[in-house]
Amino acid sequence: MKNSKRTLYLALSGIVITLYLILTYVAFFSPKDKAGRLNTQQILPTPITNLKSPIDVVQKNSLSGEELTSDEIEIRSSLLSRIDDFGYIEKQKTFTIVYMQEHDVFQVRILTADIEAGKKDAFNWLLSQGLSTNGACKLPFVFYINPKLLAKNTTFNPIPKECMNQ
């Protein structure tokens, strides 16, 4: 009887010590910011930061108020079904595309110093998914870049030039 109690005591002690070590590891070795919160910035797409109100810009300068056709709705749904675990719809060398659900906007981040080439690549990718120019403009979507890529005295328009003349 003493032997089985001792075995049970050792097993329970081992489980408690294992749980303690796991919790200690998670608490001390997870990436955290200065306030001690878990740092999720390294796995999430970067939000738009270089615009005062990107949603107002999209609504004012695009066809976002127009209704999508049934084909465009199907393509839009197909794009949304491609969202991976990190929020990306598409990742290429010159751009990435994410969907901002809270604003119902597709966000295209330009990754290259040749901003116009990155914009063109992203817009052409949307067209290659079956959207017309008009349909791509109605998604809506907006470009953004890291401000460090922007040369001095250069203006950056977050709206595709193809959508400005629609």
Image (cartoon, rainbow, N blue to C red):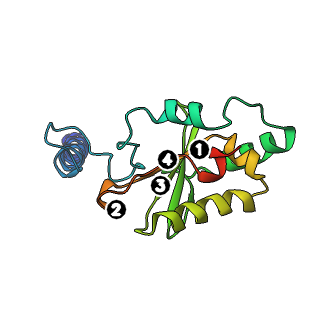
The residue under the point 73% across, 43% down is 77
Mark 3 closeness class: few <14, some 14–19, many ≥20 residues within 10 Å: many
- Give, as a three-letter code, the residue at label 1: Phe
Distance between the Cα atoms at labels 4 and 1?
A: 9 Å
The residue under the point 79% across, 43% down is 72
Distance between the Cα atoms at labels 3 and 2?
A: 12 Å
Residue at label 1?
A: 141
Apparent side of residue 32 relative to residue 72 in the rendered image (left or right)? left
Circle 1 SS class: strand
Depth order, front residue of 162/89: 162
Residue ranking furthest to the left: 34
Distance between the Cα atoms at labels 3 and 1?
A: 11 Å
Q: Is residue 106 above or below residue 161?
A: above
Q: Judge depth for marks 3 and 2 and give the one in front.
A: 2
Q: Is residue 29 above or below residue 62?
A: below
Q: Judge depth for marks 4 and 3 and give the one in front.
A: 4
Query: Considering the image in quadrants, where does the C terminus appear?
Result: top right
Query: Which mark identifies residue 149?
Result: 2
- Give, as a three-letter code, the residue at label 3: Arg
Residues tagged 3 and 2 counted as in contact (Cβ below 8 A) = no
Residue ranking furthest to the right: 70
Mark 2 closeness class: few <14, some 14–19, many ≥20 residues within 10 Å: few
Apparent side of residue 104 relative to residue 5 in the rendered image (left or right)? right
Q: Earlier in the sequence, mark 4 or mark 1?
A: 1
- Give, as a three-letter code, the residue at label 4: Pro
Apparent side of residue 43 relative to residue 27 in the rendered image (left or right)? right
Distance between the Cα atoms at labels 1 and 2?
A: 20 Å
Q: Judge depth for marks 4 and 1 and give the one in front.
A: 4
Query: Which mark identifies residue 158?
Result: 4
